[in-house]
Image: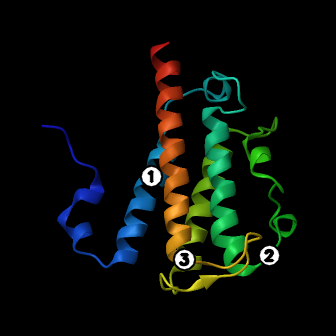
Amino acid sequence: MPAFPPTFAEAVVAQPLAAQFEAFLDEHRAALDGCLEGLTEEQVRRPLVASRTTLLGLVKHATFVERVWFDEAVTGRSRAELGIPAASEESFVLDDGDTVAGVRHAYRAACAASRRATATLGLDDVLSGHRMGPVPLRWVYLHVLRELAQHCGHADILREQIVDG
């Protein structure tokens, strides 16, 4: 019998909706972070598709996503102030200094900051700092979860190509 993900646990199912969102987000955050586990710097930078998508680039982009939706949208600080790219596409670009350890550290720090930024907010609280306009936290949770789920799928495929290829 296959193992169920942690979010299938009765303790998660019985939680209030906000706690369920956070559990699902954390499950996907951990999966994306884990896609780099045990691979070399060369492997995580290896381009396997026509786009800029690499395993390391996916995690770097996920850091951008966390900063946009749980820092920019919550605080109203600009992307320039946050030190992140102006456009999403740019967040996949790897610099010479990007390493597995550095990107994972930045990602984990961004996820922890996201948890702190939303800890006192309710699902119906409106975040007004994003350039698309005011959106409730519940929408942001759903959007980020969609992003993470999509990128976890990408990471699974890329990792499979690296490990089995």
Mark 1 or mark 3, which has the lower sequence index? 1
Q: Badge 1: how crowded within 10 Å, few (<14), some, or many (20+)?
A: many
Residue occupying image coordinates x 52% and y 35%: 155
Q: Is residue 37 visible?
A: no
Label 1 – label 3 distance at C-alpha = 18 Å
Say which residue appears at 69% left-offset and 56% top-offset: 64
What residue would you read off at disc 3? Answer: 137
Q: Residue furthest right?
A: 80
Residue type indicated by callout 1: His
Say what secondary structure mark 2 lies in: loop
- 163 vs 71: above or below: above
Q: Nearer the viewer, residue 3 or 109?
A: 3
Q: x%, y% of residue 73?
A: 69, 74
Q: Residues within 10 Å of mark 2 (few under 14, many from 20)?
A: some
Quarter-of-image position of residue 24: bottom left
Q: Are marks 1 and 3 in contact (CB under 8 Å)?
A: no
Kindly indicate whether the residue at mark 2 contacts the one at mark 3 (C-beta within 8 angstroms): no
Question: What percent of the width, then of the height, locates residue 39?
Answer: 54, 28
